[in-house]
Image (cartoon, helix red, strand yellow):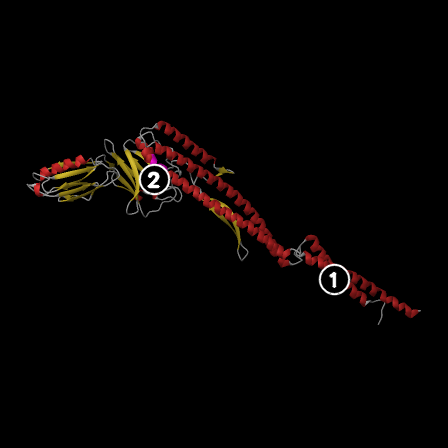
Amino acid sequence: MSSILTNKSAMVALQTLKTINTSLAKTQSEISTGMKVATAKDNASIWAISKVMEADVKGFKGIAESLSLGESTVAVARQAAETVTDLLTDIKSKIVAAQEQNVDREKIQTDITALRDQINSVVNAAQFNGLNLLKGTDDVNILSSLDRASDGSVSANSITVARQDMTTTAGVLGTGTDLSPNATLSDTSASNVGNSETITIATDADMSDNTISLTIGGATLNYAAGDLSGDQDAAAAAIAGDINALGIVGVTASVSTNVITLTSTRAFEDVALSATGATASAAAIAERAETLTFSAVAAVAEGDGYQVSIDGKDFTYVAGKGETFEDVAKGLKAAVDGGNLPDITTQVVQNDNGEWVLKIDNNGASAVTLARAGAAGGQASGGLFGLEAIDVRTDAGAQAALSNIETLINNSIDGAAAFGSAQGRIETQSNFISKLTDSLKAGIGTLVDANMEEASARLQALQVQQQLGIQALSIANQSPQSILSLFR
């Protein structure tokens, strides 16, 4: 049936043309924007995913800037720490030169003072954007990543860079928990008198048939039968004379009847002792120095301070972050050495029990009092504490400086190495973030970017379809005209 009111062919052609025009408009939009998902109505789920990933990309750009700033800050600190190490090494060479007595120690001390001042200048200048990692003990956190969990929650992660304090500050003893039980003094007085042991010659009215062998500090005396004469008292007197004639450093012998008393004034060394054919009271004569022994099991926290008093003068060291009793003992040694107490020398060792020990020797004319204290909650001493007190103008000062400078060099080396490790980690993370950002961008592009080759081919096809649709609609619109022929 033909109708002039309803043209079904035109309606079909029109709907087909509308569909073609819609597809053509979408394809043209893809070509003009380069995106197949430009708005939420194009594909709501894909659009939502892409927007979340785009937000992450922008966040990682901020992280990259944070890492760049952090890397620059750590690089400045590392370079400064390396420079400090070089300057401390120069100071060591001056100290070594000062061990000779026929040098101008005043001029050497002037050079050391200049190098020390340069170290302080380097430490104070080692800042980037106002942040100095060579002063203080607080850690610095550098934003390094944004981690998105499967539930969509986001958390920030940071790289922690530990400050390496290279100041020379003395620190302040706190008023917190009493820590004195962690440090044990061998005596409350340091005597200038040496320690003694005895060798007893057995009672014998005729010593001519006796053989005796003595070893004292590595020196040996052998007496064969016939070498000694008289009774035990005469033999003891002769042996004591022979011991003194050996000239053993720090060791003297005296005699009372048949007992030889050996006295050692060696500060930091036991004197081995053995006897055959006679009786030694001990296997060694103990060193003269008194000891401050630190616990092998107690922990050391930042701000824990320990103090040793010598003849009423206090010497303090307060531990920084991550330090141990080794650092405390060496810090107290530096403090005592820097006090310029006449006739007082120190040494730090670790005993067989794993305990760190500060030895204090008095070579003065009279005994000095000793006391110790400890408290938590103090202000930490600087990592180069003791540098200010280095003075090589005396024999004792030059000798003390030689051991103390090694501690300072090790501290600066450890600091530079820590900064180097942190800088390497930041650089690695920065490279990873850069690659991760590129991967995220590529992933977003895969989701929303249009395939231009495909879009171009589709555009041409749709343009042809549009032309055909228009032609079909034109034909459909002309079909009712054939009805006019019925009325001619």
In the rendered image, the residue lying farthest to the bottom is 1
Q: Position of residue 354 (x, y in %)?
A: 30, 47
Whether the magenta-drawn stretch holds residue 403 is answered as yes
Q: Is residue 392 left or right of residue 482?
A: left
Q: Position of residue 427 (x, y in %)?
A: 51, 46
Quadrant assignment, res 27: bottom right
Mark-to-mark CA distance, 1 and 2: 87 Å
Q: Residues within 10 Å of mark 2 (few under 14, many from 20)?
A: many
Residue type pointed to by label 1: Thr
Q: Is residue 278 left or right of residue 343?
A: left
Q: Is residue 444 left or right of residue 143?
A: right
Q: Residues within 10 Å of mark 1 (few under 14, many from 20)?
A: few
Residue wearing tag 2: 330
Residue wearing tag 1: 19
Residues rendered magenta in the picture: 401-405
Q: Quadrant of the N terminus?
A: bottom right
Element at label 1: helix
Camera-side mark, 1 or 2: 2
Q: Is residue 168 above or below residue 52?
A: above
Element at label 2: helix
In the rendered image, the residue lying farthest to the right is 488
Residue type pointed to by label 2: Lys
Quadrant assignment, res 39: bottom right
> Is residue 173 among what the camera can see?
no
Q: Position of residue 421 (x, y in %)?
A: 45, 46
Whichever of labels 1 and 2 marks the residue nearer the N terminus, that label is 1
Whether the magenta-drawn stretch holds residue 345 is answered as no
Q: Quadrant of the C terminus?
A: bottom right
Q: Position of residue 310 (x, y in %)?
A: 29, 35
